Amino acid sequence: MKILVTGGNGVLGQAVSKLFLSCNIDFIIASRNQKAKNYNDNNNTSSHLNHFKWIYMDLSKNEGLNKSMNNDIDTVLHLASLPLQRIHQQPADITLTKNLLDSIQKKNVKHFIYSSIVGIDKIPFSYYQGKLECERLIKASGIPYTILRTTQFHDFVDAVASKLLKFPITFVPKSLKVQPIHVDAVAMEIYKIIKEAPLNSTYDIGGKKVYNIKEIMDSLLKIRHENKLILNMPAMGKVIQGFVKGYNTCDNIASTSSTWEEYLATKYLK
């Protein structure tokens, strides 16, 4: 099995790369940023493991695609994403996915794996709608596929909450729900997927517990020994209401994921 990984420099891409290296899996990182080429050395991975290959690929500009694709690629792991960016007046991820699907040797690819997000079919957020269109393109391509939708990663939840807490007074819909998942658990789920036959379907996976945003912020403030005033605001708009209703959460729990509290302890109590 020869695996092509797009988005190898991202949070999930790096977690997947570490896991694949530890399992001695042969894979190629496709990226527009050459720092992925040195990722293995920078992380001091054991010398007995295969060093992954790096090829230049810019999916946003349709560059480096045809010449970089090898006929022996039989598994594509599509993790590349440009959140909140637009290309040709549409969410950038649509262009990335179209260019990737147009470039690969479809007859040789036995499994196309796509990392998506829980709730994109119910929450009318433009980025989510772009991801949903990517899913549709993959399903229509005729390539055997598995689409894994996950809840938000711990570090993303941390970053969003921390940004909101920068203000002297924070206004949020306190009942907004979130289900943080450890990125390494998602990488492990992807490892399981590549060893199995394509499902030709979509499934969800989430963290161990659903919180409201007030609980997330309170725990973050407590472990950082900070004190901020958090006031409730109405859940205005269909996007916010979707998060309040918990459309971004799921019942399928990742057993290997650490909890939000364990994440906080690991990061802030070193």
Image (cartoon, grey):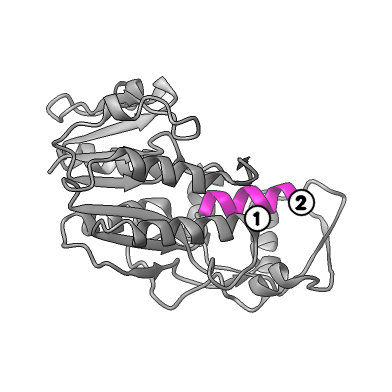
Q: Which of pointers 1 and 2 lies earlier in the amino acid sequence? A: 2
Indicate which disc residue 220 carries: 1
Residue 142 at least partly seen: yes
Q: Is residue 237 above or below residue 223?
A: below
Residue at the image position 22 percent from the left and 54 percent from the top: 111
Residue 42 at least partly seen: no
Q: Is residue 240 above or below residue 126?
A: below
As helix, strand or loop, the secondary structure at mark 2 comes to loop
87 on left or right of 26: right
Residue 138 position, x and y percent, is 36, 57
* Magenta-colored segment: predominant secondary structure: helix
Q: Are marks 1 and 2 in contact (CB under 8 Å)?
A: yes
Residue at the image position 71 percent from the left and 50 percent from the top: 225
- Count residues near mark 1 (Cα–Cα under 10 Å), then give few for <14, some for 14-19, many for 20+: many
Residue 142 position, x and y percent, is 27, 59
Magenta highlight range: 154-165
The quadrant of the picture occupied by the N terminus is top left
214 on left or right of 183: right
When asked about the image quadrant of residue 50, the answer is: top left
Amino acid type, residue under disc 1 in the picture: Leu
In the image, 254 versus 71, the foreground residue is: 71
Asked whether 187 falls inside the magenta stretch, the response is no
Amino acid type, residue under disc 2 in the picture: Leu
Indicate which disc residue 142 carries: none
Residue at the image position 51 percent from the left and 56 percent from the top: 131
Residue receiving disc 2: 165
When asked about the image quadrant of residue 102, the answer is: top left
Residue 116 position, x and y percent, is 44, 58
In the image, 196 versus 22, the foreground residue is: 196
Numbered disc in front, either 1 or 2 = 2
Q: How many marks?
A: 2
